[in-house]
Image (cartoon, rainbow, N blue to C red):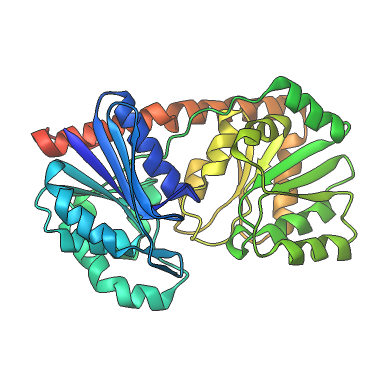
Amino acid sequence: MKILQLGKFHPILGGVEKVMYDLMTGLASKGVACDMMCAAAEGAGGETRVGDHATLITCRTAFKASSTMLAPSMALKLRKICGQYDIIHIHHPDPMACAALFLSGYKGRVVLHWHSDILKNRALLSAYRPLQDWLVRRADRIVGTTPVYVRESPYLRGVQSKTTWIPIGVRPMRPDPQSVAGIRAGYGHRKIIFSLGRLVPYKGYRFLIDAARYLDDSYIVLIGGSGPLRDSLQRQIDTAGLADKVKLLGFIPDEGLPSWFGACDLFCFSSIYKTEACGIAQIEAMSCGKPVVATDIPGSGVPWVNVHGYSGLNVPPGDSEALARAIKGIMVSDTAYRTYSVHAESRYKTMFTEDKMINDCIDLYEELLFRKPGIL
């Protein structure tokens, strides 16, 4: 069989693009021919062979509207080559990819990967809604990243019979012991609370910063990532007199991330809106055996990923005191901490490995092509 992953831009700028790329390379590593087509975030586009069984196809972007890359050449290219593929696996939300599929005339099987609803841009959703509804009808199967999101999405209520879910899988973090020791030495014997993500409103970092007021000086909160709220968050830190207790680390390159996950004692995921559909960073933390404090966002898969009382604790979104209580609740004793740590790693190994995600997708593809009974 031959598969095409169709969706967002490359190079990788976010979670959806990473899932697409990991599916392409992971499927190819198991001998499944799998290409990936997307808009080029930069440059003229082109084709790059990736190993023996995969090709990355990028299409030149004419301009960007909101978070959507508009690449008319994608529609032309897909129409030309779509007949090569047994299945097109399209990743939502991406209006450009949806338009390209609509115009392609493709007659084969379609898997729709529903990463999240469109929540932020109501004007975009209004214009895109007829095409989105077509895509939902056209898809043979609709895959969510958690059972919660596909069950709760208002756009999927009439098609639950063809929905399933495949958890996002990631490779385990491999911290470098020397780098971990260096990071920990820089903060003495303090308990390191780590968070990672873009500095944007839905991440809820203002509440995590405020939570530091309820932690004693044995704790330090480290926030990795860049974004438009950096200056305002730094002002919040300075105004509250928390400069010794909260640090904004800035952008951390991928190769440095394992050491920060390895060095922390606990990972805190403070997002406040359903825009946060799953929370890949908390999965990466679990792969290092780190307990998680996350938020119980209605309709989101975040609290499903982090099992309350098992891999960590979930608290109401936007509640700084609750974040602090949960952090202290996990760190209260060595015994409690070790229990959460073991369970966090177990949760990762059971549900969120890349190998599981790839195998689940292969099972789904074979079910569609060879009509195996049952669902995942």
Q: Which of 180 and 56 is in front in this view?
A: 56
Say which quarter of the image contains residue 229. bottom right
Residue drawn at point x = 68 percent, y = 58 percent: 205
Count of numbered marks: 0
Residue 345 falls left or right of residue 156: right
Is residue 310 among what the camera can see? no
Which residue, as the protein is rendered here, is positioned at the far front? Answer: 44
Residue 229 falls left or right of residue 85: right
Q: Position of residue 306 (x, y in %)?
A: 54, 41
Q: Position of residue 39 (x, y in %)?
A: 36, 56
Residue 315 to residue 169: above or below = below
- In the picture, which quadrant includes the C terminus? top left
Is residue 324 among what the camera can see? yes
- In the picture, which quadrant includes the N terminus? top left
Residue drawn at point x = 14 percent, y = 39 percent: 368
Q: Position of residue 89 (x, y in %)?
A: 25, 46
Residue drawn at point x = 67 percent, y = 48 percent: 251
Q: Nearer the viewer, residue 216 or 184?
A: 184
Q: Which of 255 and 79 is in front in this view?
A: 79
Which residue, as the protein is rendered here, is positioned at the far top? Answer: 177
Residue 307 falls left or right of residue 299: right
Q: Where is residue 91 in the image (x, y as percent from the top left)?
A: 33, 52
Say which quarter of the image contains residue 86. top left
Residue 314 to residue 283: above or below = below
Q: Which of 252 and 312 is in front in this view?
A: 252
